[in-house]
Amino acid sequence: MKNNKKALIMLENGYYEYGRAFASEGTNFSEFVFNTSMTGYEEILTDPSYKGQTVLFTNPLIGNYGITKVDFQSKKI
């Protein structure tokens, strides 16, 4: 899946990074939350309780084993 939507993350202290967007467009404000799980990222990314938050995963191997749609908690991220 190729995505060319540019994104900018800017922190309150002025630090910023450019990247690519995959789940949203426009200007959004959110709280960053860390998740240390090694598995279950489909459930985490589709869990409605994370609405309005940006999830940061601490495991560098997230996504290596693909996805299973039956694990989704809702229909969209």
Image (tube, rainbow, N blue to C red):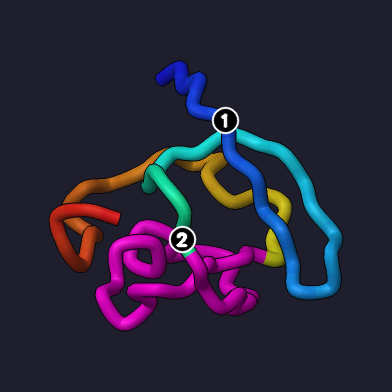
Q: Mark 1 points at which residue?
A: 6
Q: Is residue 72 left or right of 65 when viewed as pictured?
A: left
Task: Using the rendered view, name the quadrant where residue 48 is placed.
Answer: bottom left
Asked whether residue 48 is drawn in magenta, I would say yes
Q: Taking 53 as reference, is 19 above or below it? A: above
Q: Identify which residue is drawn at 46% across, 60% down.
A: 28
Residues drawn in magenta: 29-57
Q: Which of 10 and 48 is in front in this view?
A: 10
Q: Disc 2 residue type?
A: Asn
For the C terminus, the image quarter is: bottom left
Mark 2: few/some/many CA within 10 Å (<14, 14-19, 20+): few
Q: Is residue 51 left or right of 63 when viewed as pictured?
A: left
Q: Mark 2 points at which residue?
A: 28
Distance of label 2 from label 1 (alpha carbons): 14 Å
Task: Using the rendered view, name the quadrant where residue 19 is placed.
Answer: top right
Task: Using the rendered view, name the quadrant where residue 14 is placed.
Answer: bottom right
Q: Of the two numbered discs 2 and 1 on the same chain, state the one appearing first in sequence.
A: 1
Q: Identify which residue is drawn at 38% across, 77% down.
A: 50
SS label for mark 1: strand
SS label for mark 2: loop
Horizontal and vertical percent for residue 27?
A: 47, 53
Q: Is residue 21 left or right of 48 when viewed as pictured?
A: right
Q: Taking 51 as reference, is 66 above or below it? A: above
Q: Identify which residue is drawn at 21% across, 53% down.
A: 76
Q: Nearer the viewer, residue 48 or 31?
A: 31
Asked whether residue 73 is drawn in magenta, I would say no
Could you tell me if the residues under marks 2 and 1 are in contact, i.e. CB atoms within 8 Å?
A: no
Q: Identify which residue is drawn at 72% across, 39% down.
A: 18
Q: Which of 47 and 5 is in front in this view?
A: 5
Q: Taking 29 as reference, is 62 above or below it? A: above
Q: Disc 1 residue type?
A: Lys
The residue lying furthest to the bottom in this view is 49
